[in-house]
Image: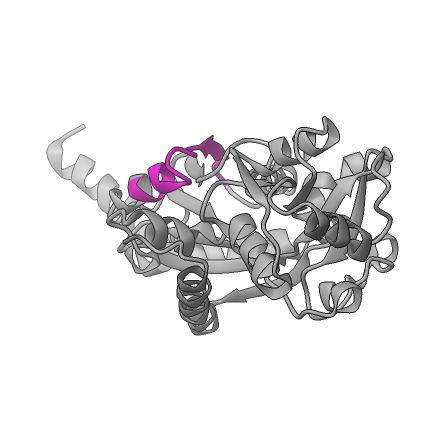
Amino acid sequence: MGLHSALALVLVLVAAAPAGAAWEPTKPIEFVVPAGTGGGADQMARLISGIAEKHKLSPRPLIVVNKSGGAGAEGFLDVKGKKGDAHTLIITLSNLFTTPLHTGIPFNWRDLTPISRMALDQFILWVNAETPYKTAKEYIAAVKAKPTSFKMGGTGSAQEDQILTIQLEQALGLKFIYVPFKGGGEVCVNLVGNHVDSTVNNPIECASHWKAGRVRPLAVFDTARIPVAEWKDIPTVKEALGVDVHYQMLRGLFGPPGMPKDAVDWYVDLLKKVYDTPDFQKYLTEGALKPAFVSGADYVKWVEENEQLHMELMAKGGLLKK
């Protein structure tokens, strides 16, 4: 084939490509979880990856990678370093705010590209089912009677679980020994094993142990009860203890800094399709997560407001980096 005919063929092929073909991934997508395996973020990432594959929503697989070092700092700094990369995603919990505020690592959520919020996660005060405490009031009375002898388990230090513990302490004039664990799955296992007296776990992290009769939920940290059949009998902290302590955690997705806009649009579309599947909706219901899909400017506004909230809560609890 002469050079001219070869060139002509190239031109024909170029012309045959659809004009302005929308962006889509051309290699596997690294899906970073800045937390350990088995916790809420890890479960959601693996579910999203599985649904995308099952329903053939992405031409390339989403490969989940856990980078939990430094309360998620390892994952955040890794993605921050991949400027303009269109084949990396990170799922975040509220350690998006707490880790930099507490550790002073050179990272802020503005270093990432916001994609979408998939849900808001609840927190529940749990005790071991073998303990005599049937209500939050009974448990708190026991804690008050023996200050600084009860252990509260949670994920990480200076993260959501400890912020909630401090809010509870301040509202009720208590003191717990806070015991940090690597991930939410581990927290509930330690409650089952009686290594701690209570935990403030996400519903989904303790749900299987609850169904098996090993743990008991005492109160939910929200302004209203969880409106799902099996969870709706759990009172709010305000109902149970008369103090208004509530907090919800982000389950959201971001890309690296400077992710191309057409890639962002593709991911928003992918995640909305995942969100709308019966599989994901069933997961939200069973895990008592708040359905809360949002993207674009609304997502950014929510993130900005929540960064401010975390600054205030952590300042109150003495958790800000000195």
- Say which quadrant the C terminus sits in: bottom left
Instruction: Locate residue 101 relative to residue 306 in the image: left or right.
Output: left
The outermost residue toward the left is 3
Looking at the image, residue 16 lies above or below residue 69: below
* Magenta-drawn stretch contains 65: yes
Looking at the picture, tell me which residue is in the foreground, 283 or 231. Answer: 231
Position of residue 295 measured from the top left corner of the image (x, y, whole percent): 49, 66
Looking at the image, residue 128 lies above or below residue 291: above
Q: At x 49% / y 33%, what residue is drawn?
A: 64
Q: At x 67% / y 60%, what residue is drawn?
A: 221
Position of residue 156 measured from the top left corner of the image (x, y, whole percent): 49, 40
Q: Quadrant of residue 308?
A: bottom left
Looking at the image, residue 259 lies above or below residue 38: below
Q: Does residue 71 appear anywhere in the picture?
A: yes
Q: Does residue 20 appear anywhere in the picture?
A: no
- Say which quadrant the N terminus sits in: top left
**Magenta-colored span:** 59-77
Q: At x 78% / y 65%, what residue is drawn?
A: 225
Q: At x 41% / y 33%, what residue is drawn?
A: 67
Position of residue 217 measured from the top left corner of the image (x, y, whole percent): 79, 48
